[in-house]
Image (cartoon, grey):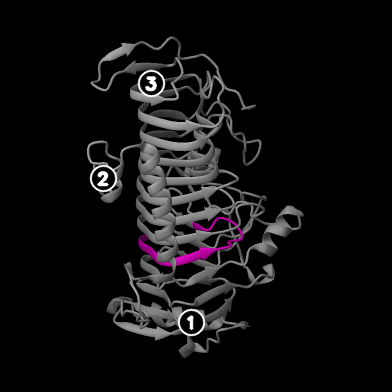
């Protein structure tokens, strides 16, 4: 169970908290965080070893022994020249580890080199360890990528009816799996896939880079994932998942659907200390699509996302939905810097989804040059087919935003509920966002009910009850059903 601490984040909490902040102004604080965070990310990408910075000198590159038995990929015929296909070497290595479950499993070390491979499966009680300068390269020809059935909560290949391509690194019905290293790289070489997708030359849905299904006790840390053909990291119906100190990269444009991390019907998950810059949502929490997700009925819940730097020119830094038909609840998002992005935080759904989004808390958010800061959208009408029930209406309620700061934000808030899908019990507390578009109606609302506590800038719409910092009611909401959405801004 992920512990949801009240003052998680250490130095982040101190920097944001008004009583302990060492900076005289929020602008000074913002500049400091911006410079310090990017600088630390750049240093960390090159010098992190098992979670510790190496301050000078040459890092020790001997892989730690995380299992009682350790193998090297070269023992199974691997050749790291970027040309030789190493699928069989990976399969033999995984096969050897699969026989060691009752002895604590095994570790497969991938040494420096460029290791070309087709998709392969993991096994339980396994550590896949990528040395520094080790690169696992995905073969680009789709004939090497096996087809798999559609996921039961989607009923559809997401892009095409029928089966879908496998992920490059795949696992299902596993327990105790670790993917880690000295910041080695898994490279999906997605450029060919993106081009074929745009040219409509693919007959099946593209595969993720790493996908783990129906599994528990998963740790992914200290690696770089880049240029996935489709979603990058997709844990599906998993429990007890940790993603820590992972860098995820794809071009911020012309790399369609390259989401960073998509927790999908997952429970008890921690994502922390990551840098994500991709061509779609940096993170998108999901739980199934329309009637298939409703029938499958597995929510995403108990998820903590903290201490991240994210960028998304196309979509959002952190999203919930739009596939959320199994429900999403008890999510904490804190200590997040979103920069040069189209949107920062977004919840998206539509009639036909069913399910719910509730008990969601966002705190300590920093926005830098973001077009729209906070979005709740209830008409995201993508459906798997005509069989969905438009009367299956999602429930959106109990959503809190606390300590929001930003510069260069065009529209700080756009909450678009509807008569069918109202948004209930939304709280804003302590929000000061510098805006670039000095027009009225930049805090936009429709069919929303909630409360605004303390200082809120820009001023909230009239759908919110206003309270002072002592919690005393200052002004009742004028109307909760007024529509004040302007997509021209």
Segment tinted magenta in the rendering: 215-233
Is residue 379 magenta-colored? no
- Sequence-first tag of 2 and 1: 2
Q: Residue at x 30, y 42 (%)?
A: 23
| Residue 223 image offset from top left, x and y in percent | 44, 67
Distance between the Cα atoms at labels 1 and 3? Answer: 54 Å
Residue 98 in the figure: left or right of residue 315? left
Does any portion of residue 177 appear in the rendered image? Answer: yes
Residue 208, above or below 345: below
Q: Residue at x 50, y 70 (%)?
A: 185
Identify the residue under disc 1.
112
Identify the residue under disc 3.
450
Is residue 226 magenta-colored? yes
| Residue 320 image offset from top left, x and y in percent | 47, 40
- Quarter of the image where the C terminus is located: top right
Assign a secondary structure to mark 3. strand
- Sequence-first tag of 1 and 3: 1
> Around disc 2, counting alpha carbons within 10 Å, would you say few (fewer than 14), some (14 to 19), or many (20 or more)?
some
Identify the residue under disc 2.
14
């Amino acid at each position: 169970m992920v512990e949801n601490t009240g003052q998680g984040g250490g130095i982040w909490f101190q920097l944001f908290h008004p009583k302990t902040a060492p900076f005289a102004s929020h602008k000074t604080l913002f500049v400091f965080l911006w410079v310090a965070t990017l600088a630390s990310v750049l240093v960390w990408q090159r010098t992190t070893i098992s979670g510790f910075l190496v301050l000078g000198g040459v890092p020790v590159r001997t892989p730690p022994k995380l299992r009682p038995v350790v193998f090297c990929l070269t023992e199974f015929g691997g050749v790291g020249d970027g040309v030789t296909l190493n699928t069989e070497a990976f399969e033999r290595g995984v096969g050897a580890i699969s026989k060691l479950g009752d002895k604590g499993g095994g570790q497969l070390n991938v040494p420096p080199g460029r290791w070309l491979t087709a998709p392969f499966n993991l096994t339980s009680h396994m550590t896949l360890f990528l040395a520094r300068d080790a690169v696992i390269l995905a073969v680009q020809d789709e004939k090497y990528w096996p087809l798999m059935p559609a996921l039961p909560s989607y009923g559809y290949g997401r892009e095409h009816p029928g089966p879908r391509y496998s992920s490059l690194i795949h696992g299902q019905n596993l327990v105790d799996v670790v993917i880690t290293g000295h910041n080695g790289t898994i490279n999906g070489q997605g450029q060919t896939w993106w081009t074929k997708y745009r040219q409509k030359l693919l007959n099946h849905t593209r595969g993720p880079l790493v996908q783990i299904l129906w599994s528990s006790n998963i740790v992914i840390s200290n690696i770089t994932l880049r240029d996935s053909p489709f979603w990058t990291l997709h844990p599906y119906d998993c429990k007890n998942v940790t993603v820590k100190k992972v860098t995820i990269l794809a071009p911020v444009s012309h790399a369609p659907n390259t989401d960073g991390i998509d927790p999908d019907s997952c429970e008890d998950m921690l994502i922390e200390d990551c840098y994500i810059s991709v061509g779609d949502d940096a993170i998108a929490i999901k739980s199934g699509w329309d009637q298939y997700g409703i029938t499958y009925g597995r929510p995403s819940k108990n998820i903590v996302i903290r201490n991240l730097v994210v960028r998304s020119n196309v979509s959002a830094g952190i999203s919930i939905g739009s596939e959320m038909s199994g429900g999403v609840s008890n999510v904490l998002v804190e200590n997040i810097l979103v920069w040069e992005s189209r949107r920062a935080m977004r919840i998206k759904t539509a009639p036909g989804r069913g399910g719910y989004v509730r008990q969601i808390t966002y705190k300590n958010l920093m926005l830098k040059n973001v077009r729209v800061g906070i979005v709740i959208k209830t008409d995201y009408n993508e459906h798997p087919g005509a069989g969905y029930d438009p009367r299956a209406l999602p429930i959106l309620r109990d959503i809190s935003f606390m300590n929001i700061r930003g510069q260069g934000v065009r529209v700080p808030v756009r909450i678009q509920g509807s008569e069918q899908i109202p948004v209930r019990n939304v709280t804003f507390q302590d929000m000061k966002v510098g805006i670039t578009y000095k027009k009225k109606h930049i805090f936009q609302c429709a069919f929303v009910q909630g409360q605004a506590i303390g200082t809120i800038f820009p001023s909230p719409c009239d759908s919110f009850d206003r309270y002072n910092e002592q919690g005393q009611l200052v002004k009742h909401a004028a109307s909760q059903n007024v529509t004040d959405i302007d997509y021209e801004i």
